[in-house]
Image: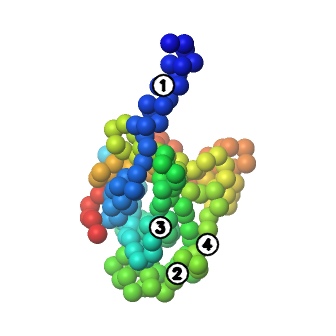
Amino acid sequence: MSIAAALLVFWGNLSAQNKVSKSDLEHIVKTMSGGFSSEAQSIADSAFFNISLKMKPIWQNIKGANWLYVEQAMAAMLQKPYRQRVYKVELLGDTAISSTVFELPNPFRFIGGIEKPELLSRFSPDSLIYRVGCAIILKKNTDQTFSGSTVGKGCLSSLRGASYATSKVTISDNKIVSWDQGWDKEDKQIWGAVKGGYIFEKRKSW
């Protein structure tokens, strides 16, 4: 067998191992749904803050996609989340899962929506603000975890003088590792963790 042929077989087998299905999508959504905390990491390393991350399914009657409402806040300031988003999680062909990111109009009106779902009935998919270039593309690993990132410099951000943002994510059964960083036009980091991603351990399932 030639080297070229051997490579084709190798990549063909790898692709087959990494294919994703509807059951993988359901598993990802179930895993992402819940309350997470970086408390253990913050105790072990003072470079990281104690952060609460909550994600809850919404609009479950809409077929063809899975939607999650997201609140992220300092553990000591749960009533003042610094990030509120909606994620649209869906299959991207048979090789990846995408998590598309949306902002909310007047997000302060929906604070606490995790515990008070009636608040979330006040907006619909067509009222969301699409964050161009900020989708996370997740691939299945051989150990059955999923990892991925944003693509290139397409996720624009003006936070603290940044030009664009990047996100890297790894999802396992009871843990999400998330590394969000902001960069200036010269690719110098402006905000976000420096040493590595935040480790969010699952504390509660919905």
Q: Is residue 38 left or right of residue 180?
A: left
The residue sitting at the right extreme is 185
Residue at which label 2 appears: 124
Q: In this view, does 198 lie to the left or right of 180?
A: left
* Residue 46 in sight: no
The x, y position of residue 3, in whole percent, is: 55, 14
> Counting residues from the N terminus, which is met first, the one under dot 3 or under dot 2?
3
Q: How is the image coloured?
A: rainbow
Assess whether mark 1 and mark 3 are in contact (beta carbons under 8 angstroms): no
Q: Residue 129 carries which label?
A: 4
From the viewer's perspective, is residue 41 above or below residue 205?
Answer: above
Q: Quarter-wise, where is residue 57 in the image?
A: bottom left
Q: Report the amino acid beneath label 4.
A: Ile
Q: Quarter-wise, where is residue 52 in the image?
A: bottom left
- Which of 119/77 is in front? 119
> Counting residues from the N terminus, which is met first, the one under dot 3 or under dot 4?
3
Assess whether mark 2 and mark 3 are in contact (beta carbons under 8 angstroms): no
> Counting residues from the N terminus, which is met first, the one under dot 1 or under dot 4?
1
Q: Report the amino acid beneath label 2.
A: Ser
> Counting residues from the N terminus, which is met first, the one under dot 2 or under dot 1?
1
Residue at which label 1 appears: 9
The x, y position of residue 167, in whole percent, is: 53, 51
Q: The residue tagged with tag 1: helix, strand or loop?
A: helix
> Counting residues from the N terminus, which is met first, the one under dot 3 or under dot 1?
1
**Which of pointers 3 and 2 indicates the residue nearer the eye?**
3
How far apart are labels 3 and 1 at the CA level? 33 Å
From the viewer's perspective, is residue 205 above or below residue 120?
Answer: above
